[in-house]
Image: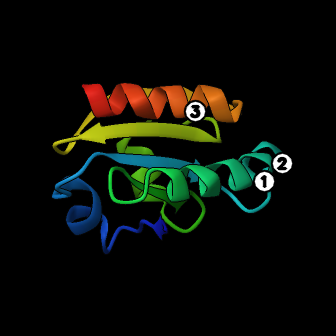
Amino acid sequence: MEYQFTTNNFETEVTNSDIPVMIDFYADWCGPCKMMSPIVNQMADKYDGKVKIGKVNVDQNPELAGRFGIMSIPSFLFIKDGKVVNSSVGGMSPDMLSSKIDTLLQA
């Protein structure tokens, strides 16, 4: 299951999550973001129950993008216990993304 994170639900869904979280910062007009979307969906299914995987639309939630210094999209943040433990900018293969999520689980 893929989540939509917003300013309204961020504290509950991300900061206070009892499992690690991966956030995909994206925009509807972003080509590389569209290419990553099916890969992110695939990871959401693969890691369901182990990692909360969701998206933040930077156009609808500019304050979240600003809080994390998101300058380029797609950007991915990997969060554990409410703290960013890793980040990545740009598109990547399913294997690369899966590897980053595995690292998050071991952190």
Residue visible at 27% across and 26% down? 106
Left or right: residue 85 compared with residue 35: left
Could you tell me which secondary element the residue under label 2 belongs to?
helix
Which residue occupies the foreground of this view, 99 or 34?
99
Mark 3 = which residue?
A: 97
Left or right: residue 46 compared with residue 42: left
Asked whether the beta carbons under mark 3 and mark 2 sit within 8 Å of each other, the answer is: no
Q: How far apart are marks 1 and 2 (CA)?
A: 5 Å
Q: Residue 44 carries which label?
A: none
Q: Distance between the residues labelled 3 and 2?
A: 18 Å
Residue visible at 79% across and 42% down? 32
Relative image position of residue 39 (x, y in whole percent): 68, 48
* Residue 105 figure quarter: top left
* Residue 20 figure quarter: top left
Q: Can residue 100 be seen in this view?
A: yes
Residue visible at 72% across and 46% down? 36
Say which label, 3 or 2, has the lower sequence index: 2
Q: Which mark is residue 34?
A: 1
Q: Single out the mark in the foreground, 3 or 2.
A: 3
Could you tell me which secondary element the residue under label 3 belongs to?
helix
Mark 2 = which residue?
A: 31
Total tally of numbered discs in the picture: 3
Asked whether the beta carbons under mark 1 and mark 2 sit within 8 Å of each other, the answer is: yes
* Residue 91 figure quarter: top right
Q: How is the image coloured?
A: rainbow
Relative image position of residue 31 (x, y in whole percent): 84, 48
Q: Which residue lies furthest to the bottom in this view?
A: 8
Q: Can residue 86 be seen in this view?
A: no
